[in-house]
Image (cartoon, rainbow, N blue to C red):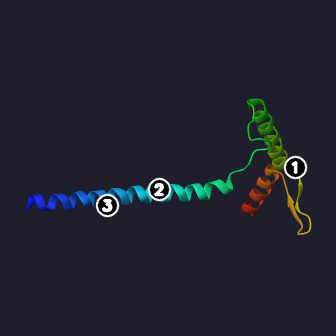
Amino acid sequence: MSNASAPASNSSFTATLLAAVGAFAIFLLIMLVAYLPNKVPLPGDGVRTPEQRKAALDELRGKDKTTATTYGWVDKDAGVVRIPIAQAKELFLQEQSK
């Protein structure tokens, strides 16, 4: 009786293993398809030197600092403006203290 159940459990294990490997492969395929279209292409050929990466990061940080510390239009037609973070905090605290 134990010999009759051994082949059945072996084929069951094989089927379970194949199902697990197949599910993992499908998961990897879905992740690959979902990730690749969202990948931001780099300017040029995609290879940057450390100096180029540092320059790009410095430029980005400069833009972020300017955006966070100056007034400007977000959408002029809709009348939406950007104000410095420090000013926004002050206005918020004033509104909350009333």
- The residue drawn where x is 79% and y is 55% is 88
Extreme residue in the left direction:
1
Q: Which of the labelled discs sits on residue 15, or is there none? A: 3
Q: CA distance from mark 1 to mark 3?
A: 63 Å
Quarter of the figure with the C terminus: bottom right
Question: With 14 as the anchor, is 2 left or right in this view?
Answer: left
Q: Quadrant of residue 7?
A: bottom left
Extreme residue in the bottom direction:
78
Q: Nearer the viewer, residue 19 or 61?
A: 19
- Please, what secondary structure does the residue beneath circle 3 have? helix
- Under mark 1, the amino acid is Thr
Question: With 15 as the anchor, is 69 left or right in this view?
Answer: right
- Please, what secondary structure does the residue beneath circle 2 have? helix
Q: Position of residue 39 (x, y in %)?
A: 68, 51
Residue carrying label 2: 25
* 10 Å crowding of disc 2: few (<14), some (14-19), many (20+): few
Q: CA distance from mark 2 to mark 1?
A: 49 Å
Q: Position of residue 85 (x, y in %)?
A: 79, 51
User: In front of the other: label 1 or label 3?
Assistant: 3
- Under mark 3, the amino acid is Ala
- The residue drawn where x is 26% and y is 61% is 12
Q: CA distance from mark 3 to mark 2?
A: 15 Å
- Under mark 2, the amino acid is Ala
Quarter of the figure with the N terminus: bottom left
* 10 Å crowding of disc 1: few (<14), some (14-19), many (20+): few
| Upstream in sequence: badge 2 or badge 1 | 2
Q: Which of the labelled discs sits on residue 70, or is there none? A: 1
Q: Nearer the viewer, residue 86 or 27?
A: 27
User: In front of the other: label 2 or label 1?
Assistant: 2
Q: Which of the labelled discs sits on residue 79, or is there none? A: none
